[in-house]
Image (cartoon, rainbow, N blue to C red):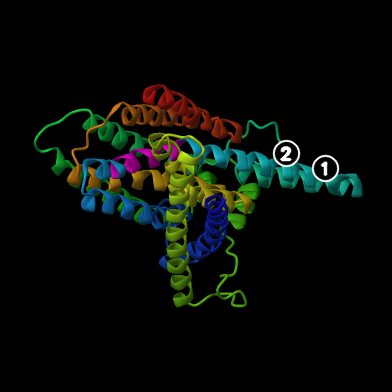
């Protein structure tokens, strides 16, 4: 029971810490004068993925046995899989729930006055649609209505898929200079980092106005909503918080997230055998979700706040880190040789990304289709049980 209690406590602490973290990282993005998308793809993603990368670094550099080093390799493969399937699926479900809640609120407002209520509902639909298809609609509106945000998300997924294909291919072959290629993965992330930080300062919705894809009034309402910053939780009475407070809140919440995430994983490792799960199943099936819990929590919080762009950008940015930094460490310090289970996880990850890319390119990325990505994780689980048996 103690392990179960700790598991629940850690999950609650991670969520509350993420509430403070996303609040601080938005102010940090304003201080650094970076665009809203870069706040998600770089600042938030780097902060939540850094602790996981440190765990991989410790595993591959200090592991005394091949099995200990394999933990780092498994983390480098399990993280992208959990993000591409579970994280996107949870975001889709959160969007669906938010749309239902908004629809219920709008319906409740109609009896108070049909004319006024109808006008309010119409405005709410337009704004909610811009926030990510969460309005009272038929469920077929795009999650990202503007071509600017959608194009950036497609580009992120293309970058990830290209890097991930190379990453998996290297795990299936062996040659003398393979470890040196780990440096190339660091270089790829450096280029991605520079591109996001230098190109993200322009407001994303400006592209939408130029393209004429959405109504200016609705898009402006969305932009105002997503650009609005809540008071810093550490200084709630100040309209503009002090820089030291922003940095302190960011670092403190990251430390709490890191410790809580590690405790969460350790409780899963202990509970797995208690309920009859093999250690390999716990390591490959449950631990990746636990390590990506901060990114998932961030997405839920931002969707709840109506900031869908940040939620999706956080996941795509974290995927780029997971595809490069842990992989580079694994290539440098391990043999980077995949067994059947790791190869299966790589295949499912690539299939999930191809599905998401096809949906985005067809401009059919809805909350329901985003939630469908979770099915690929169930397929992975079924295949993993078969492989291990």
User: Looking at the picture, how far across and down is residue 58, in whole percent?
Assistant: 27, 54
Q: Quadrant of residue 233?
A: bottom right
User: Looking at the picture, how far across and down is residue 47, in whole percent?
Assistant: 40, 58
User: Looking at the picture, how far across and down is residue 62, in whole percent?
Assistant: 22, 53
Q: Which mark is residue 25?
A: none
Residue range of the region highlighted in magenta in the rendering: 72-84
Depicted 162 relative to depicted 292: above or below:
above
Q: Which sits in the foreground, 225 or 187?
A: 187
Q: Specify the farthest residue to the left.
A: 176
Q: Residue at x 56, y 47 (%)?
A: 308
Decide: few, some or many residues near mark 1? Use Cα within 10 Å; few <14, some 14-19, many ≥20. some
The residue pinned by badge 1 equals 107
Q: Quadrant of residue 177?
A: top left
Mostly what secondary structure, the magenta segment? Answer: helix
Q: Quadrant of residue 283?
A: top left
Helix, strand or loop for disc 1: helix
Horizontal side of residue 297 vs 243, given as left or right: right
Q: Residue at x 82, y 42 (%)?
A: 107
The residue pinned by badge 2 equals 136
């Amino acid at each position: 029971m103690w392990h179960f209690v700790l598991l629940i406590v850690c999950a609650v602490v991670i969520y509350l810490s993420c509430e403070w973290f996303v609040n601080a990282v938005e102010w940090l993005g304003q201080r650094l004068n970076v665009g809203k998308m870069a706040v998600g793809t770089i600042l938030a993603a780097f902060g939540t993925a850094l602790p996981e990368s440190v765990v991989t670094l410790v595993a591959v550099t200090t592991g005394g046995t091949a099995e200990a080093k394999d933990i780092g390799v498994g983390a480098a493969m399990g993280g992208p899989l959990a993000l591409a399937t579970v994280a996107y699926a949870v975001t889709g479900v959160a969007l669906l729930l938010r749309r239902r809640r908004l629809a219920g609120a709008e319906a409740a407002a109609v009896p108070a006055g049909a004319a006024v209520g109808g006008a309010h509902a119409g405005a709410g639909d337009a704004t909610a649609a811009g926030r990510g298809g969460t309005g009272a609609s038929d469920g077929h509106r795009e999650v990202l209505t503007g071509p600017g945000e959608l194009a950036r998300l497609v580009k992120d997924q293309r970058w990830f898929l290209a890097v991930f294909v190379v990453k998996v291919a290297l795990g299936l072959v062996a040659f003398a200079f393979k470890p040196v290629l780990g440096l190339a993965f660091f270089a790829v992330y450096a280029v991605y980092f520079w591109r996001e930080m230098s190109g993200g300062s322009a407001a994303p919705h400006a592209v939408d106005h130029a393209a004429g894809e959405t109504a200016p009034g609705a898009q402006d309402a969305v932009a105002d909503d997503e650009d609005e910053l809540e008071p810093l939780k550490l200084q709630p009475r100040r309209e503009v918080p002090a820089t030291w407070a922003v940095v302190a809140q960011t670092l403190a919440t990251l430390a709490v997230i890191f410790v809580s995430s590690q405790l969460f994983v350790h409780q899963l490792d202990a509970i797995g055998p208690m309920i009859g799960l093999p250690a390999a199943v716990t390591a490959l099936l449950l631990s990746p979700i636990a390590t990506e819990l901060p990114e998932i929590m961030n997405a839920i919080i931002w969707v709840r706040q109506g900031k869908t762009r940040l939620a999706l950008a956080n996941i795509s940015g974290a995927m780029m880190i997971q595809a490069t930094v842990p992989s580079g460490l694994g290539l440098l310090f391990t043999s980077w040789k995949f067994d059947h289970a790791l190869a299966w996880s790589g295949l499912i990850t690539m299939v999930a990304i191809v599905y998401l890319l096809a949906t985005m390119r067809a401009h059919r990325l809805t909350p329901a289709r985003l939630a469908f990505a979770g099915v690929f994780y169930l397929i992975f689980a079924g295949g993993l049980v078969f492989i291990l048996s």
